[in-house]
Amino acid sequence: MTYKLKRSAERVQKVLDEFDLGLQAVELPDSTRTAKEAADAIGCTIGQIVKSLVFRTKISKEPILILVSGKNRVNEKAVKEYIGEKLEKADADFILECTGYAIGGIPPVGHKTPITTYIDEDLMNYDEIWAAAGTPNAVFKLTSGALAKITNGSIIGIK
C-alpha cells in the first residue's frame, strides 16, 4: 500500500525533490505543531526542531523568515542589526498569504513568494534536525548544512 501525503506536505516534498538530497517528508500520528510536540513525536531534543517563524519588517512590510532552534527565542533587536529595520509580528493572514501554509506547519522552503531567510546559528550545532513539511503533523529530517543549502539562508545569531 502506498502512503499518500496531504496536499500541503506533497507541495513541500516536490520542492525537496528538486534539491536531490534524498529529503523525505513524513506525516506522524502525533502533532508537530509546536517545537515541544514535534520533539516528543519524533523522539529528539527540542533544540533539533527547526521553528519557521515569519515576521514582517516594520517599514517596508516585507516578510522575513527566521529558522530558529526549538530551544531558542528570537531577539528582535539582535535580528534588526542584520536586516537594518525593526521587525513586527506577522498575523496568520499575512503568513498564509506569503508562504501558502498555515501556522503550525510552515516549512523552510516552498513558499508562495520568495522570502528572505535567516538561520539561527545554534542549528549548525546539530548533525540531524527536523523541519515542518506543510501540515501540523508533517516533518522532514535533514542536516544543518542541507538547511542552509535548500533555503539559501544567512546564518546569524538570533539570541
Image: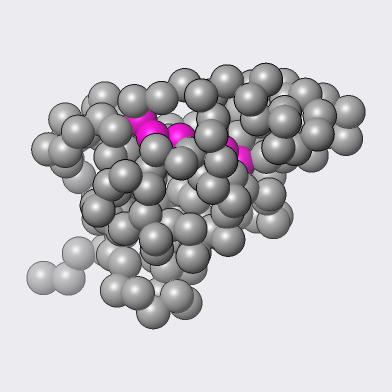
- What residue occupies the far right of the structure in this picture? 59
Split into 4 quadrants, where in the image is the N terminus? Answer: bottom left
Q: Is residue 80 left or right of residue 38?
A: right
Q: Residue at x 31, y 58 (%)?
A: 143
From the top left corner, tell me how far across and down residue 128 is, in percent: 24, 52
Q: Residue at x 32, y 38 (%)?
A: 49
Q: According to the image, what is the colour scheme of the structure?
A: one colour
**69 inside magenta stretch:** yes
- Name which quarter of the figure residue 135 lies in: top left
Q: Is residue 59 above or below residue 101?
A: above
From the top left corner, tell me how far across and down residue 134 is, in percent: 43, 48
Q: Is residue 62 above or below residue 21?
A: above
Q: Main secondary structure of the magenta part?
A: strand
Q: Is residue 104 left or right of residue 38?
A: right
- Name which quarter of the figure residue 9 lies in: bottom left
Q: Is residue 118 left or right of residue 135?
A: right
Q: Residue at x 40, y 63 (%)?
A: 146
**140 inside magenta stretch:** no
- Name which quarter of the figure residue 132 lies in: top left
Q: Is residue 47 visible?
A: yes
Judging depth in this view, the residue of 91 and 52 nearest the camera is 52
Q: Is residue 78 above or below residue 152?
A: above
Q: Residue at x 29, y 33 (%)?
A: 47
From the top left corner, tell me how far across and down residue 34 is, in percent: 34, 27
Q: How many numbered marks, from 0 up? A: 0
Q: Which residues are magenta?
A: 65-70
Q: Is residue 100 visible?
A: no
